[in-house]
Image (tube, helix red, strand yellow):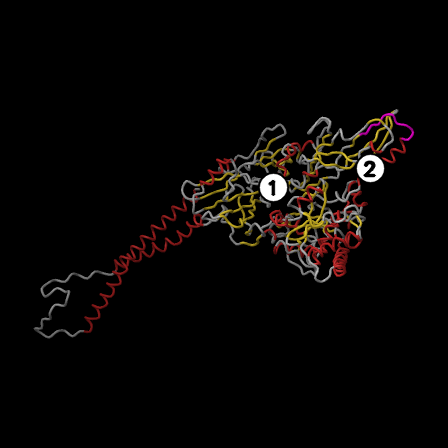
Amino acid sequence: MVETLLSWIGLAGAALLALTGVILLAIFTPKWLQRRRAGSASTHASASTMPPPPGYAAPPAPGRPGPGVPLRPAKSPRGALAGSIVGAVLLAAAIPLGVVSAGPVFTATAAAGGLPTRIVSESDTYRFTESTTLGEYESARYNFRFDPRESVLEAYEAQRPNDQLVAAYYDSELTRIANYSAETEVFGNGFALQPEEITVIDADYNELGGERDPGSYGEAGSWSVTEIYLVQYVDRDGTEYDKPIVTRAVIEPDEKTLAAPSVDYEVSTDGVLQLSWQPVDGAERYIPVYANVSDLGNNTFFMLGDVGSDATSWSSTSGQTRDCYLIAAEVVSQNCSLEPAFVRAEDSDLGAYGVLAIAADGTRSFVDRIDAAPINPLIPVGVGGSDIGSGEYNGSLDRVPSFASVTTLTDASVSLPLTLVGSRTDGETGVLEVKVAGTDVVRELRYSGIDGTWGTFVEAVGRKLSEAAVTKAGAIQASLRQADADVQRDAPISSSQPEVDIPLTDEFGAAGEYLSANLLAGNRRIDLTGAAESPYDPIELASAVISQTPAALVRSFDVTLDFSESTERRILEVTYVYPQDQLAERREQTWSAAQDVVAEIVADGMDERDTALALNDWIAANADYDQGAYQAYRAGGDVRSDPTYAAAWDASGILLDGTGVCASYAAAFKLLSDVAGIETVYLSGAAYSVGHAWNKTFMDGRWQVVDPTWNDSEAAPNALFGISDEIAASEFGHTFGPGGWMIPTLAGQYAAE
């Protein structure tokens, strides 16, 4: 506000200087020129004219006094010259003053020196500028040619966020509005997004003490995150853009602010959420939080736990007791520490997880937010009781359920299979111990009046439940971003784009091609400095490029900091499926196999649908679902690091070995589509709340769902070929979030309708 007021004062001063200068020039410059010419003419005459003869009296010249009238002394031109010089100086001084003052008034600027205006990329719905920076406590400032106060008043009266003109979001999907207030100026048309402090609430719904004192930094709170996304919906005149303009702003922390813990997450096969992080210098404790966004855009951090300075991980079963009831007494609860997320299930698409580092004096860190949308459907909070039957024993398998009803963190009810894990007898009562898949819950089925057939009955139950538990989902990592000990820290850092023979992923601009080329070259450490200048978050970009580059054969990645040179660099550290001495050969074999398949089954003149169907049917005829890899995954542990199952999660599994899990099916279909020249994306999500991967292909002028894994079925072949997202969700339980497989702001353009 003050800055803009000073700018208007500067403009007024510049205008006054310019006006005074012009007036002085207009008055004195003509006089100076006239007197300069008059003085020159008089000097010339006295030097060249002969004196008149004696007695001669010349008549008076027109306009001059006659004889006997004294002449007035001629005025010197110096006064007029001085006036002209002063006018010129004033006019010259007005120009730079006006330029400097006009910047904040007549351009839309951010507090950190001005938003970039050069558009570097564009999607179906947005335009993106190059990235910029903002200080932790700095407001994002804009100036318009209209009064923005009317929009602010309308938002207040309608009880909605101020997001009609410009807005700030925490996520690149532009769904989680940041914690800010909209400030207008008394003089002028200035508009500012001023960050506000985020409230932290403990388990007893008390506000966490030891907060920052905003008064020591000015009125603004902290943005509290490492980056935000600024969106301009209208131009300076208030005309709505056909595509809003998005600018990624990296937030520079105050020197007192702790570094944000770099957090990875994993959902175990038992449905337990685990957050892990690297230690932060100066942290006395760590607080895992669930971030909730209200209808008005107010953000609140709900504490999920509180661990000491030595801790580097936390799980959702930490401190859990079996007497917690999230749903009902007869329902066994799990993950009780996630109650803040469960009671806000209707807002789960906007929730996020993170870890807050706290110093001894209460100083907080930034929080790197992890999108809760792809996580919450995978987390169980309750396993039904009445549907898991017991009763009188009659030896019939019909009395033994194969599935149990499970409530997820999104308050959805799904049926998950049971597995027999033990049995015993207690007199005339037989007990079956069954584990509910995807949970850590073991239930007892009790049957009274057993007889000598009990042993045979138990064996039959085991076979029945094993057959029911067979599925073609549930074997996909929740996140590709995982710290890996296999990465060699002494491997060279690639900072240039290598030449490769395999076509590059081109959905994400120059930065995406740079990463794609380095991945296809097998580089294990890649400099992200150049990628940081793109409009996309580097971590989201890396995850999306890896997902859409199946020939890279990547297992996982992490982002670290390197200080080997004079400046800090963010490094993408990549772990590949195969050892370095096998990687290049395996990649070439996979690429060649894809080319051979396409050459064999795709004929000239085939359209997109026929081509996609041919690729889908080839996979169904030549691939088998790797149940061994799936069962090993369910048993826990890092199966992808086991050489026995390494290929089961990438395109080489299906194309070279003829077997793999859903991720391998989807990656193979994506690679075959790339070779055949049809547009296809790989995506990850959940099928009936169990991790799954499938594809979308552009056919008949629109995107359509293709699930090559589930299409490989004798009972319902190709049931998921060429259908919409809505049908995939309602009839087959396929749900997905925008992140991980794609840049969130770009995911909408792949909607299958």
Q: Nearer the viewer, residue 257 or 303?
A: 303
Query: Up-down: is 453 above or below 168?
Result: above
Q: Residue furthest left?
A: 55
Q: Residue furthest top?
A: 427
Between label 2 and label 1, give the one nearer the viewer: 2
For disc 1, the marked residue is: 259
Disc 2 marks a residue whose amino acid type is Leu
Which corner quadrant of the image does residue 349 belong to? top right
Give x and y (percent) for residue 50: 16, 75
Give x and y (percent) for residue 13: 36, 48
Disc 1 marks a residue whose amino acid type is Ala
For disc 2, the marked residue is: 465
Give x and y (percent) for residue 320: 71, 30
Q: Which disc is residue 90 wearing?
A: none
Distance CA(mark 2)–CA(mark 1): 49 Å
Counting other residues with Cα less than 10 Å from the Cα at mark 2, is it few (<14), some (14-19), or many (20 or more)?
some
In the rendered picture of this protein, how many numbered marks are placed on residues? 2
Report the span colored magenta. Answer: 444-453
Task: Please give left or right for residue 484 compared with residue 446 in the image.
Answer: left
